[in-house]
Amino acid sequence: MRLYEYEAKELLKKYGIAVPQFMLVTAADGTSFSSQVIAKIQVLANGRGKAGGIKVCNSSSEATNFIKEKLNSFFLKEKVTSILIEKKENLNHEFYISIAYDTETESPILLLGKEGGVEVEQNRGVVRKAIDPIIGLREWQARDAAVDAGFDSKIIPKVSEFAVKLYNFFITEDCRLVEINPLADTDFGLVAVGALIELDDNAAYKHKERSYPPRVVGIGRELTQRELDVKKANEVDYRGTVSYLELDGDIGFLAAGGGGSMAAMDALMQHGGRPANYAEHSGDPPREKVCALTKAILSKPNLSGLWIVGAIANFTRIDHTMQGMIDAFVEVKPKFPIVVRRSGPYEKEGLQMLKEAAGQYRLDVEVHGSETTMTATAKTIAEKSKKFKETYGNLT
């Protein structure tokens, strides 16, 4: 789970890590600011600074105008509901420091650079030091990293002490990433001027005090109502798994999980189709959970088609999952074309059930089994989607 910057700084303060004085603005209510401030749009997407989401304001009116302009607008595809207003610090120098997990070394890693700023991670001057998860980060190791990165000898003790404190925070709070950019050297010590934190969702049970709303893993934005509905379906019934991630296309996508699902999505895009979501089911979920997933997919506005696809299932009965999908079709009654390619246990029975339901409820459904490749049906749904939009207008 990625935190908003104000959430990250509130958490850092609990560990004695200095951050600028700040306030969170959620309404353009005429609040005045007595000194030079920095206004920061609060979104979870990367690239905020380059896109104009951070502004140094030299007067109260400049800050107010920025708030009025940006609040409740869309920025990097996210709605802006709050803006962080920080006191501008007098900076002697800016650095970069982060701690993350490295999949190659299978250990935490310290990244340290003597320059902060935009896209600093790509700077060749950033030093990477693996951290032994048993021993942890020692000050002498942090000092070595600072020396390798070319830090001035006067600042090295402060930076190494800060690095150890940040690592203890990283471990205690079960983080996936903590990035301070910039870490500023001020007259009052080191201050975390910019902060990015990603928490490990799998460790959430250890932190009952947290009350952050659910967010999409790897992307950061908060969950949509459809994503919340599918998440709830998993929570109330442990049998099997269903998942749903919203995208910006117009063809509903319901897959059977695994690497074949990603290959299928690639095939759909190669044929000009744009997926409206990524959804999958596995582990033989009951019809109720499959119905909830299918309804979530169908409820997205402006769909031009639905593609249900999967390779040969090993542990999932096709007739059970098809019955869940049929339940959703009967309730929603979609008008757009549906293309199905599924195979596995009880394949004939499941696909026959779907054919009969399509005839009974006048659904535009084309059904394929193991005799047809998944990529062939990718072309079919892309063509049907295009024809549907040509007939009924561009709905995207």
Image (tube, rainbow, N blue to C red):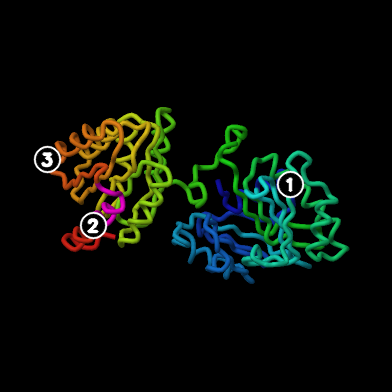
Viewer-proximal residue, 340 or 140?
Answer: 340
Q: Identify the residue under disc 2.
A: 385
Which is more N-terminal, label 3 or label 2? 3
- What residue lies at 48% left-to-right and 57% top-to-bottom? 80
On whether residue 87 falls in the magenta region, the answer is no
Dot 2, crowdedness within 10 Å: few (<14), some or many (≥20)? Answer: many
Q: Kindly report the distance in space between the C-alpha atoms of the residues bearing marks 1 and 2.
A: 51 Å
- Residue 375 among those drawn in magenta: yes
| Disc 1 from disc 3: Cα separation | 62 Å
Name the element at disc 2.
helix
Query: Nearer the viewer's eye, disc 1 or disc 3?
Result: 3
Residue 258: x, y in percent?
Answer: 42, 43
Q: Who comes first in sequence, dot 1 or dot 2?
A: 1
Mark 1–mark 3 contact, CB under 8 Å?
A: no
- Residue drawn at x 49%, y 42% is 214
Q: Say which residue label 3 marks.
A: 359
* Quarter of the figure with the N terminus: top right
Secondary structure category for the residue under label 1 = helix
Please report the bounds of the magenta region as a residue range. Answer: 372-384
